[in-house]
Image (tube, grey):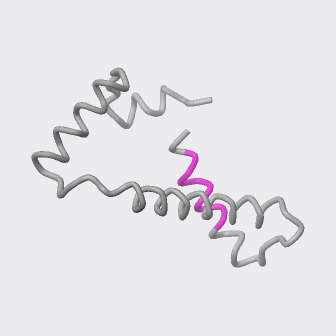
């Protein structure tokens, strides 16, 4: 569960609908950003990110557990991903 007290202390929270968020992103891409990526590019980027998560799960919980050095990297990646949820 998200700790909103931590977020409120360190970030400005703005609550908006998905449609409002999409409009802000669309405006940014059209005025400042370069362009939208193609469907193929979006799919491959998503597949790459899912593969990273799968690697973490496999190394952490699978039968082929990682070495000691890899465990530190896995911990850092899990820590970074914790901010997304």
Q: Position of residue 70 (x, y in %)?
A: 69, 75
Residue at 78% over, 74% down: 66
Q: Is residue 78 magenta?
A: yes
Predominant SS along the magenta part? helix
Q: Is residue 67 magenta?
A: no
Q: Position of residue 32 (x, y in %)?
A: 12, 50
> Over which residues does the magenta segment extend?
74-82
Residue at 39% over, 31% down: 9
Quadrant location of the C terminus in the rendered image: top right
Q: Residue furthest right?
A: 63
Q: In the figure, 70 relative to 15: above or below?
A: below
Which quadrant of the view contains residue 61?
A: bottom right
Quadrant location of the N terminus in the rendered image: top right
Q: Is residue 79 left or right of residue 40?
A: right
Residue at 48% over, 33% down: 6
Q: Position of residue 79 (x, y in %)?
A: 59, 53
Residue at 17% over, 58% down: 34
Q: In the figure, 81 relative to 52: above or below?
A: above
Is 47 or 20 nearer to us in this picture? 47
């Amino acid at each position: 569960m998200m700790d909103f007290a931590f977020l409120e202390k360190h970030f400005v929270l703005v609550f908006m609908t998905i449609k409002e968020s999409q409009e802000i992103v669309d405006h940014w891409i059209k005025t400042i950003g370069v362009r939208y990526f193609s469907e193929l590019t979006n799919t491959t980027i998503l597949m790459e990110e899912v593969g990273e998560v799968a690697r973490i799960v496999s190394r952490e919980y699978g039968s082929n557990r990682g070495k000691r050095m890899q465990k530190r990297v896995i911990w850092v990646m899990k820590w970074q991903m914790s901010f997304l949820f």
